[in-house]
Image (cartoon, rainbow, N blue to C red):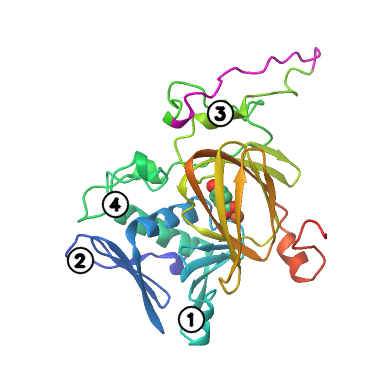
Amino acid sequence: MSMNEVVQSSAPNGAGYKSFTIGAFTFGRDEFFARIAWPTGTHVLSVDVFLRALQRDVAWDFFYGTVNFDSVIGTVNHYGTVDLFAGRYNESYRKAELDYVENFESGHLRETFKAMLEDWTNSEFDPFASPAETGKPFGEKSGSNTSAITRRRVAANRMVGVPGDEQIRTDASHPINRMFADVSQDEPLLEAEPGFENEVAAFNLFAYLSRSDVTWNPSVVSVCKESLYCPTTEEYILPVIHGNDRIEWFVQLSDEIRWEVEDGDTGKKRAAVTMKAGDVAAMPGDIRHQGYSPKRSMLLVWENGSPDLPRLIAAGQAPIYPVDF
Ligand code: PHB
Ligand code: FE
């Protein structure tokens, strides 16, 4: 760890929580709220919203492009460094010149966020879980939930089930979720030509997803060059407003999600998209979006993981719309 990766934190406050400082930002929590201050302003948000977003930003290592915790606070990934911003993608804050951005080495911000997540998450609360399946995050500090917040995202090298990628979770340690009791658990019958037994594989993706114990946390189940299949199970609200730095595709595998789509830079409303089972949508590269899933649903997020895309888009050499009508 280099000097500037040292996590700066204060002694616990009256509610038992530490405060954290990184650059000119400070983060504090009390019984209900996360409070953030920067040289030109302050912000307050409900601590459940804050912790669910913080959990994703940490687990996804700042993800593709922008992770807005809400309409004010968030991060932009530059893949090695990361911007922490306040009001930068909010037209009113920018007009009032209250916005602020600071760039950090990714490791420095990651370690600070991890320490904050650890200190601020009480034993009852699991930020990855649906609110219907976890306790409350509120109140004075009581215990911790390290095993929940350090869960690792499943990420296949080639495909779930092939040699080296045997993470398929159909065992007793991953019970079928209450909302997916009707999902068939049959596995496909595979008859490989002799000599190809290690080269071909198949699995029941619906059965796999029916056993996911987390929400809004895509796992990479197959990788073909830069094509990443990242299915996930969704319930309640996507805890971040994601502004991608490339086009991404959604395939609604079951049930329904409503997407609120805003301009990525200003936050102005652009569209509301209701996706039902079987619907396919491409999200343009210049928007941000947040999903609402009224019942636990299965969603396939399809990403082009090419590290060249942000540069190609900035240079006008790759499109931000998948199709020109
Ligand atoms: C997204 O922002 O595209 C996203 C993130 C997490 C999910 C689904 C979609 O679970
Ligand atoms: Fe997205």
Q: CA distance from mark 1 to mark 4?
A: 29 Å
Nearest to the eye among marks 3 and 2: give it.
3
For residue 13, the mark is 2
Q: Which is more N-terminal, label 4 or label 3?
A: 4
Question: Does the magenta-highlighted stretch encompass residue 286?
Answer: no
Residue 304 in view: no
Q: Residue 304: where, in percent of width, then height?
A: 72, 51
C-beta proximity under 8 Å, tags 2 and 1: no
Main SS, magenta residues: loop
Q: CA distance from mark 4 to mark 2?
A: 17 Å
**Going by the image, does 118 lie left or right of 105?**
left
Quadrant where the image shows the C terminus: bottom right
Residue labelled with disc 3: 208
Residue extent of the magenta highlight: 179-195
Q: Amino acid at mark 3?
A: Tyr
Label 2 crowding class (10 Å Cα cut-off): few <14, some 14-19, many 20+? some
